[in-house]
Amino acid sequence: MKKIIGMLLVGMLFFSCSLAPDEVACGQIVDCPEAIAAKAFYFAEQYRDTETVYVWGGQDGLRAALALDCSGLVVRCYGYAVEDSAYWLLFDDASSADFYERYARLVPLAELRQGDLLFMGEQSTDTVTHIALFDRLDGEELYFIDSTQKDTDGDGIADIDGVTERHYACDDERIKAFGILQVGTL
């Protein structure tokens, strides 16, 4: 009987703390802890190592490892990272612009930790259209894991297709901002 009552109390707490799109019914919104961000990066490495391909809107699970887009990679990696923790995601699904505008605290490059967010877009605009998980800064190069499809040499064939590790110069105009994911906690 005590076990059933305990399960009911946990269930009531879960439902009473459910999230609306822009609020937490109980608990608080905090910066994602460094350990959770590092765990998310670990899962990004797993996707990279399974040669997952890019598909716009794709969010296949790690075991399926079929197709992901850039935001799907972040959603999945952080979803896995918060499992069995005291934290939860503030979203079920999100675009790179959603992460930028609603679910991250923007920080300078010096504050980034492995697994934090790198926001990108076209060189000629300030619009965020792409997201990646930050790996490291090596000299003047920013290393990251993302999911994309690009023809880099103009031959009409995608040279980059899927989850890969890449790097850009720190001053590359495609880099728009850096952020720490916000999560919910009790």
Image: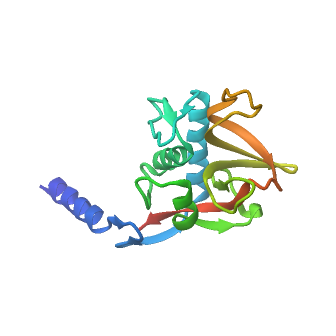
Q: Position of residue 132 (x, y in %)?
A: 63, 48
Q: Camera-side residue: 98 or 18? A: 98
Q: Residue furthest left?
A: 1
Of the 4 image quadrants, the one containing the N terminus is: bottom left
Of the 4 image quadrants, the one containing the C terminus is: bottom left
Q: Camera-side residue: 7 or 147? A: 147
Q: Quadrant of residue 112?
A: bottom right
Q: Quadrant of residue 181?
A: bottom right
Q: Position of residue 113 (x, y in %)?
A: 69, 55
128 sits left or right of 58 in the view: right
* Residue at screen point 27% across, 65% down: 13
Q: How many marks on residues?
A: 0
Q: Is residue 34 above or below residue 152?
A: below
Q: Residue furthest right?
A: 139
Q: Position of residue 7 (x, y in %)?
A: 21, 56
Q: Quadrant of residue 87?
A: bottom left
95 sits left or right of 179 in the view: left
* Residue at screen point 45% across, 72% down: 28
Q: Camera-side residue: 168 or 152? A: 152
Q: Camera-side residue: 10 or 16? A: 16
* Residue at screen point 70% across, 60% down: 125
Colour scheme employed for the rendering of this structure: rainbow
Q: Position of residue 39 (x, y in %)?
A: 57, 46
